[in-house]
């Protein structure tokens, strides 16, 4: 008997939406280079520009503000180069594509994973030259949502610029660039049900930006290289699909809350990270001191259930997450953390399968501990 395959790792990546599959397939048949002036080229250009409109509409931006990239890692690197890497301040819980892209001051977070605004304020006061702050909208490991509009008010009062990695939030929360007050916003297609290998940096009109990849006039000279037309078309289709199914967030919240209540009923000593903070409804990050992450990942994988320990971006290696350590978790507990994340094709029954497998693993482990 083959076990069911249950995918609960949407924060790592999402299965492709049907709309995106169709758009990718159609774009693969477009012969032209979008920079060519002939009819073939203009057809490819139309596909790119239609996607640009869909991406812009999803985040309340103008199409001219969208710079297509190969993904959010590139978008983050591009944004952080805006001031030549000078004056940068990031939170301690950013994705490595922000943390490693520039030598920056780090803003601490509290035990719930929220950036400390008083530290931000005092750092801004002490800065010489223009500050450039980068804080993510929602964390990929815990789902904790940062108060970006409040952060923007502080950064703007100090005359600074604000970048926001919105990869995990877009499609899960309504995101409006102007309401958030950010100058740069990073997005990734594959987290939204689009294909891998496309993303965008939204650059507010008038905000400075220095191209990191040169050698062509594409993307208003901000990102040289022939556009990945099929992936961009699929990205646009995913954005249009999301616009329609925003309602999923409300269902996820009640599923996730019931899921966490049941986890605690099975194993009351389990710690759920960021539970008191505003969080994405699709994400649950938790640790049990008796179950190392690796043991859980292997047992769950054997049961056909895919979840993640901390961030899966550099998977293969299970080490304590910098996010949970920054929240003050003990290294041993942080090394036990598991992340369950839902998305467009999830069903509530997927969580029940997880609970059954996890409960069995936990009980077996506790029985062995008692016997030894
Ligand atoms: N930022 C965050 C918060 C992410 O979760 C990820 C993907 N793990 C990235 C950036 C990088 O995105 P991409 O895979 O498109 O390079």
Image (cartoon, rainbow, N blue to C red):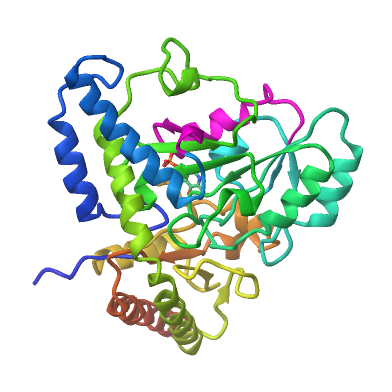
Compared with residue 138, is residue 257 higher up or lower down, i.e. above or below? below
Residue 34 image point, x, y percent:
28, 22
Evaluate whether residue 9 shows in this view.
no
* 136 or 314, nearer to the observer: 136
Residue depicted at x 38% and y 59%: 243
Residue 105 image point, x, y percent:
76, 38
Residue depicted at x 45% and y 44%: 56
Q: Is residue 3 left or right of residue 13?
A: left
* 361 or 285, nearer to the observer: 285
Q: Is residue 115 magenta?
A: no
* 72 or 179, nearer to the observer: 179
Residue 274 image point, x, y percent:
61, 69
Q: Quadrant of the N terminus?
A: bottom left
Residue depicted at x 50% and y 40%: 62
Compared with residue 364, is residue 86 higher up or lower down, i.e. above or below? above
Residue 279 image point, x, y percent:
56, 68
Total residue callouts: 0
Q: Is residue 309 left or right of residue 24?
A: right
- As drawn, the residue found furthest toward the top would be 215
- As drawn, the residue found furthest toward the left would be 1
Where does the magenta region start and end? 63-88
Q: Quadrant of residue 117?
A: bottom right
Q: Is residue 255 left or right of residue 300?
A: right
Evaluate whether residue 318 shows in this view.
yes
* 142 or 120, nearer to the observer: 120
Q: Is residue 372 left or right of residue 244?
A: right
Q: Quadrant of residue 347?
A: bottom left
Compared with residue 354, is residue 136 higher up or lower down, i.e. above or below? above
Q: Is residue 83 magenta?
A: yes
Q: Quadrant of residue 342?
A: bottom left
- As drawn, the residue found furthest toward the bottom would be 265
């Amino acid at each position: 008997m083959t076990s069911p395959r249950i995918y609960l790792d949407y924060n790592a990546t999402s299965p492709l939406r049907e709309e995106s599959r169709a758009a990718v397939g159609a774009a693969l048949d477009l012969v032209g280079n979008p920079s060519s002036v002939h009819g073939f080229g203009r057809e490819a250009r139309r596909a790119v520009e239609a996607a640009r409109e869909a991406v812009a509409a999803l985040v309340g931006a103008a199409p001219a503000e969208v710079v297509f990239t190969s993904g959010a890692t590139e978008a983050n690197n591009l944004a952080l180069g805006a001031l030549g890497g000078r004056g940068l301040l990031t939170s301690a819980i950013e994705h490595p594509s922000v943390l490693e892209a520039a030598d920056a001051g780090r803003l601490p977070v509290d035990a719930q994973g929220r950036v400390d605004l008083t530290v931000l304020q005092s750092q801004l006061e002490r800065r010489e030259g223009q500050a450039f702050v980068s804080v993510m909208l929602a964390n990929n490991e815990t789902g904790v949502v940062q108060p970006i509009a409040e952060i923007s008010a502080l950064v703007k009062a100090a005359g600074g610029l604000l970048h926001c990695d919105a990869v995990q939030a877009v499609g899960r929360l309504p995101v409006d660039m102007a309401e958030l007050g950010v100058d740069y916003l990073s997005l990734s297609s594959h987290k939204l049900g689009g294909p891998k290998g496309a993303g965008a940096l939204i650059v507010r009109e008038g905000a400075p930006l220095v191209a990191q990849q040169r050698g062509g006039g594409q993307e208003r000279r901000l990102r040289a290289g022939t556009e990945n037309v099929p992936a961009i078309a699929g990205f646009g289709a995913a954005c249009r699909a999301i616009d329609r199914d925003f309602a999923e967030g409300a269902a996820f919240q009640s599923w996730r809350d019931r899921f966490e209540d049941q986890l605690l009923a099975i194993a009351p000593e389990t710690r759920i990270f960021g539970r008191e903070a505003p969080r994405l409804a699709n994400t649950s990050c938790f640790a049990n001191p008796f179950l190392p992450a690796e043991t859980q990942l292997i047992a769950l994988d054997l049961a056909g259930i895919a979840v993640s320990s901390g961030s899966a971006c550099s998977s293969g290696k299970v080490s304590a997450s910098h996010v949970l350590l920054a929240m003050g978790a003990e290294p041993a507990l942080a090394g036990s953390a598991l992340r369950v994340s839902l998305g467009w094709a999830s069903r509530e029954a997927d969580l029940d399968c997880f609970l059954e497998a996890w409960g069995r693993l936990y009980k077996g482990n506790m029985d062995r501990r008692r016997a030894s």
